[in-house]
Image (cartoon, coloured by chain):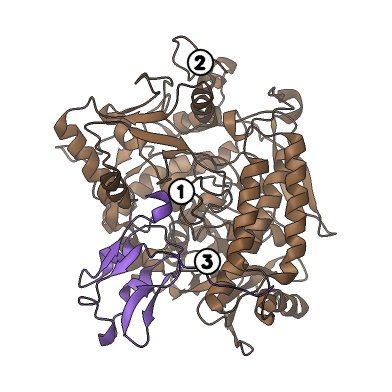
Amino acid sequence: MSEPKTEIIETDLLVIGGGTGGPMAAIKAKEANPKLRVVLMEKANVKRSGAISMGMDGLNNAVVPGYATPEQYVKEITVANDGIVNQKAVMAYATGSFPMIQYLDKLGVKFEKDGSGEYNMRKVHHMGTYVLPMPEGHNVKKVLYRQLRRLQVAVTNRYMATRLLKGADGRIAGAVGVNTRTSEFLVVKAKAVILACGAAGRLGLPASGYMFGTYENAANCGDGYAMAYHAGAELANLECYQINPLIKDYNGPSCAYVTGPFGGFTANNKGDRFIECDYWSGQMMLEFWRELQSGNGPVYLKMDHLAEETISEIETILHTNERPSRGRFHERRGNDYRKQPVEMHISEIGFCSGHSASGVAVDEFARTTVPGLYAVGDMASVPHNYMLGAFVNGGIAGADAAEYCANVDLAAHDEGHLAAEKERVLAPTRREDGLTPHEMEFKTRRLVNDYLEPPKVTAKMRIGQRRFAEIRDDLSALCARDPHELLRALEMQTILDCADMAAAASLYRTESRWGFYHLRVDHPETNDDEWFCHTALYKDENGQMAHAKRAVDPYIVPVEADEMAAYHQLRVKTPAAAE
Amino acid sequence: MPIITHAKSAAVVIDDAKCIAEKGCTVCVDVCPLDILAIDEGRQKAFMKYDECWYCMPCEADCPTGAVKVNIPYLLR
């Protein structure tokens, strides 16, 4: 390849990631200040990128007046996370939840309503009622795109951001992007940057062996986590992995949130219910895993007892929204919800605060620990945030960043850092032969499965770290023969960074917490005396991975001790399965 | 080490008779989140170039002529 060109542009606010939270951040920044220059950088195409490329089948965490209060929601999420939450950030989400639903409704996103036009809320969580179906939720991305155009947000598609740039004073100064089809650089100088790059969904390897058969959109491979880490931001509670109960092999949601309110439930091979609540918590996943270990598996999602019209309605929702190809998967297998239950399994691991709590540490304004840098959505540390949380926190970040930009100048980035980053990016293109991005990614992810999956064993995780270090040495042989291979080569390095972070974070917290998400065989008890705290992982001044404990801020919504245990009693009280 | 190639079956299938890439259409290529589709320069038809499909289906849903079919990749079918 000849040496790719570099274009340098200047803006006020750069939003990286055009999926869910990113577009809403750009929209709300523009609404706060129409004169603000906003650039939205996207690795794919904003029209169809991110976790909701085909829409969404429902809101999982809607705080709607008459069904739940923000205080109830904050309490529920505090309990579901064993108390380790920043309640202010959860409260910022909860109070923004209903206004955001109304805003999306006004823009044209369709939510299920009853005959009198009220939102048709359903119960799935252990305590409150937060689920709002979206049987016609397939147009969310179109609605967002229309609003981005209306507000004249500048969109750059097919640029992968690779590193953040900082000024001498530690403030954010912009980011480096590389075009995924030409390998040309785009350097965006910005006063503030909002990271909205989604989950680290390509961390473990799916059991099928198909590298892109992930739960998350496979483009969401942890770029935001890696960029925040290299910029010196703190990441919180990464040991609280994302692990989901999914349709076996298809590796997508089945989805209990949709089917639960209609009477579907998770069952063992005898057709019996074994958990009281299908809400995706670490404790629920632990009971799921125990059921598989006990010989009562497979675990199924059971719907064959439901009436025909109910099943038809479920099929319409599940096979036209979010992951419509699940209908095609079932058809080819001969799976019919009417005749047999759907076989489920436990997914590979990832980072995703959307469903767990592992993310870049943010406060209630979505600010990270680096001045001028924000994080939102699946990659930010507000737990169990789902799609609506990405919208709400994206909006919060956009409005806050607009105000921040009004009061600061552009920071000057370090030219030496930019030159070094360009050289790092291009290194795999300088080689004629060597190791391919696919095989290096496959091996990294296979080792993640072998050594990092719960139940977490100290000795195994240490072997994992040694093997990741060997792969890091092998990066000197990584070869990319065209821009597409370079995209995968850069993603592979992101995945390796996330694998190192997952191992280090898991080793640091020497207790068990969050059910299956952080089940440590060598430290099986929950130890509130020493570990009732957030863990922070960051790159120290010597470039080494470092850790610290961060206190849980005093609660703004008190939780009684007996309430705190609510999610610990999810197993149905029938003869217990052997362990 | 020298790099070798290795054959894979394509999960995304394009009906050449319906594909209008020769008229300048690139919709399926544009919307793919994984950037795995391309236009064959000789035949002027879309095709699946990389075995990196998330079976998400924007390519099929957005194709103006219904030329694209997303099958579940064989490994997880």
Q: Amino acid at mark 2?
A: Ala
| Other-residue count near label 2 (Cα within 10 Å), few / some / many at <14 / 14–19 / ≥20 | some
Q: What residue lies at 25% left-to-right and 44% top-to-bottom?
A: A317
Q: Choose between A289 and A378: the one closer to the eye.
A: A289
Q: Quadrant for residue B65, please give it.
A: bottom left
Q: Judge whether B3 appears above or below A494 on screen.
A: below
A560 relative position to A27: left or right? right
SS at mark 2 in the image = loop
Q: Choose between A523 and A96: the one closer to the eye.
A: A523
Q: In the rendered image, what is the letter of the chain coloured brown?
A: A
Q: Quadrant for residue A410, please give it.
A: bottom right
Q: Nearer the viewer, mark 2 or mark 1?
A: 2
Q: What residue lies at 37% left-to-right and 47% top-to-bottom?
A: A99
| Other-residue count near label 1 (Cα within 10 Å), few / some / many at <14 / 14–19 / ≥20 | many
Quarter of the image where the C terminus of chain A is located? top right
Q: Which residue is mark 3?
A: A15
* Callout 3 touching callout 2 (CB < 8 Å): no
Q: Which residue is mark 1?
A: A215
Kindly report the distance in space between the C-alpha atoms of the residues bearing marks 3 and 1.
24 Å
User: Chain B: what color?
Assistant: purple
Q: Judge whether A450 appears above or below A81 on screen.
A: below
Q: Position of residue A489 (x, y in %)?
A: 61, 68
Q: Which residue is mark 2?
A: A577
Q: Nearer the viewer, mark 3 or mark 1?
A: 1
Q: Choose between B14 and A455: the one closer to the eye.
A: B14
Q: Position of residue A64 (x, y in %)?
A: 34, 37
